[in-house]
Image (spheres, grey):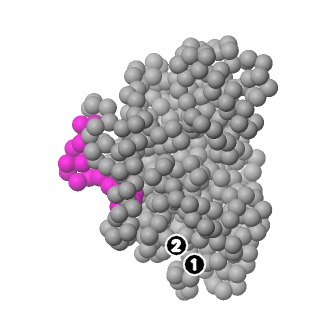
């Protein structure tokens, strides 16, 4: 997800810088073996900065076109804002200029780029040839990036690789105008989402949601019409809705090194999602999970397509056939991926060991277990809104035993202003759950 689409409590506008400058307050590069450069300013960026700080005591640099609250008032990440940094020409020019200067000033330091949003992942892929002389990073060939990031072509690839996904009907703008979505091969309710999530970020209208659950043909016709009328031109994905509440979701993060070997896989069990329309699908509570069948399928897929970097998969358990069905792959760590670091698999170390040190790998993938609950919300929201079942009881035990954590509440980076900012964000979350939460039924 681009930092533009963070939930309301995360958003704050700030005047952007006009030139690309390395942060004056961050002196890691002088005499250091490497310097992390994060792209974005959202909670994903803060989670990665915290991982680097925990593992190496290092301050990360971040570059973005917009300032968001998770990285404000922080001592572990210094954000530089650049107007139009989310656009190709500005991104390429800014990063090449920065790279040339850093190479001249600190020729022995490796500058490690990690994109933390869909837009930046795509831009890095498009500019990899120009940036590779100055930085180290994981990225994919632009054609593979497009194939994986577009949900329509991703599902086609899943079919060829025998990866389960929901029954899917794809419609173009022209087909929608002709009423192709009036006849679906499955019944209601259905899920609706754009195939091109990056292009959809530029579209805005009243009632816009990241994804929709549609209950009637009339509602579907209305939403499809609004999406296309407001400038979206890509395909739309209409899917059979998998029944069940948020506790049927799963999220998997895997690290694949530059030689296309899967080094680590960690499975999370989301218990609650953000109900705010622009943030639907963002996880709010994740418990650790383990499923070797899921690991084996995803590992084979990643190595077969010659993937590299962090891959983040969203999936949902379908009780009708016992399968975990894929919704999407994000070509980066998930915005909630600090839950992986929280449970002992520090993501920063995987990037460094692979791209900075190129450490030997014995071929034995770590299928990680965990024991800590991750929260993005106040505990009061957990107690009130998580579905009351056995999974919630296990999560409550983790809370009661102190086996839990958040991304943002880092004791080594907690000034009064930052503490106040987080309290405000939690207040907005409480307000949004009260306004938008609707219990999901089987």
Q: Residue furthest front?
A: 206
Q: Is residue 190 visible?
A: yes
Q: Secondary structure at mark 2?
A: strand
Nearer to us in this view, 410 or 66: 66
The x and y percentages for residue 332 are: 57, 52
Asked whether the residues under the numbered discs 1 and 2 touch, taking CB atoms below 8 Å apart as contact, a structural biologist would say yes
Q: Which residue is found at the position 37% from the left and 44% from the top? A: 431
Tell me the SS state at disc 1: loop
- Relative placement, left or right, of 433 versus 135 is left
User: As rendered, which of 252 and 275 lies closer to the eye?
Assistant: 275
Q: Residues within 10 Å of mark 2 (few under 14, many from 20)?
A: many
Q: Estimate the x, y position of residue 142 in percent, counting from the top left.
A: 75, 51
Q: Residue furthest left?
A: 400
- Residue behind mark 1: 23
Task: Return the residue at label 2.
Answer: 78
Q: Position of residue 313 (x, y in %)?
A: 53, 42
Q: What is the quadrant of residue 34 in the picture?
A: bottom right
Please tell me in which quadrant of the rendered image residue 197 appears.
Answer: top right
How many other residues sit within 10 Å of disc 1, few (<14), some (14-19) or many (≥20)?
some
Residue drawn at point x = 34 percent, y = 57 percent:
423
- Relative to residue 28, is residue 243 depicted above or below? above
From which residue to which does the magenta span run?
A: 392-409
User: Which numbered disc flags the more N-terminal residue, 1 or 2?
Assistant: 1
Marking on residue 437? none
Depth check: give the residue in front, 367 or 441: 441
Does 439 appear above or below 347?
above
Side (left or right) of 33 relative to 401? right
Q: CA distance from mark 1 to mark 2?
A: 6 Å
């Amino acid at each position: 997800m681009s930092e533009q689409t963070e939930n309301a409590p995360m958003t704050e506008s700030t005047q952007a810088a006009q030139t690309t400058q390395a942060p004056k307050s961050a002196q890691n590069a002088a005499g250091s073996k490497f310097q992390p450069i994060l792209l974005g300013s959202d909670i994903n960026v803060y989670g990665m900065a915290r991982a680097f700080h925990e593992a190496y005591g290092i301050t990360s640099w971040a570059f973005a076109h917009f300032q968001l609250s998770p990285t404000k008032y922080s001592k572990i990440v210094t954000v530089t804002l650049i107007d139009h940094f989310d656009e190709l020409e500005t991104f390429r020019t800014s990063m090449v200029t920065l790279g040339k200067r850093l190479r001249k000033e600190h020729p022995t330091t490796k500058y490690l780029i990690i994109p933390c949003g869909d837009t930046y992942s795509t831009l890095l892929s498009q500019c990899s040839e120009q940036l590779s002389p100055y930085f180290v990073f994981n990225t994919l060939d632009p054609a593979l990036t497009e194939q994986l990031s577009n949900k329509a072509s991703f599902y086609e690839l899943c079919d060829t690789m025998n990866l389960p996904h929901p029954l899917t009907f794809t419609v173009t703008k022209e087909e929608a105008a002709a009423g192709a979505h009036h006849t679906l091969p499955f019944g209601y309710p259905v899920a609706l989402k754009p195939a091109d999530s990056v292009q959809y970020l530029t579209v805005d209208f009243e009632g816009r949601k990241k994804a929709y659950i549609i209950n009637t043909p009339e509602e579907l016709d209305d939403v499809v019409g609004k999406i296309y009328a407001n400038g979206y031109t890509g395909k739309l994905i209409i899917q059979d809705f998998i029944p069940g509440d948020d506790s049927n979701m799963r999220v998997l993060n895997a690290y694949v090194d530059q030689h296309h070997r899967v080094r680590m896989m960690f499975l999370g069990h989301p218990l609650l999602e953000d109900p705010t329309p622009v943030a639907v699908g963002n996880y709010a509570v994740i418990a650790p999970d383990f499923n070797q069948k899921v690991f084996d399928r995803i590992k084979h897929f990643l190595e077969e397509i010659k993937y590299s970097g962090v891959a983040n998969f969203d999936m949902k358990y379908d009780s009708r056939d016992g399968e975990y069905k894929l919704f999407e792959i994000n070509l980066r760590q998930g915005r909630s991926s600090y839950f992986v670091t929280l449970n002992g698999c520090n993501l920063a170390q995987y990037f460094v060991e692979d791209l900075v040190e190129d450490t030997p790998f014995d071929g034995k993938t770590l299928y990680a277990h965990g024991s800590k609950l991750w929260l993005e919300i106040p505990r009061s929201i957990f107690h009130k809104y998580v579905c009351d079942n056995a999974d919630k009881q296990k999560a409550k035990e983790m809370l009661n035993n102190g086996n839990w954590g958040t991304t943002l509440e880092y004791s080594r980076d907690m000034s009064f202003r930052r503490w106040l900012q987080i309290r405000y964000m939690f207040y907005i979350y409480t307000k949004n759950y009260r306004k938008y939460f609707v219990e999901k039924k089987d």
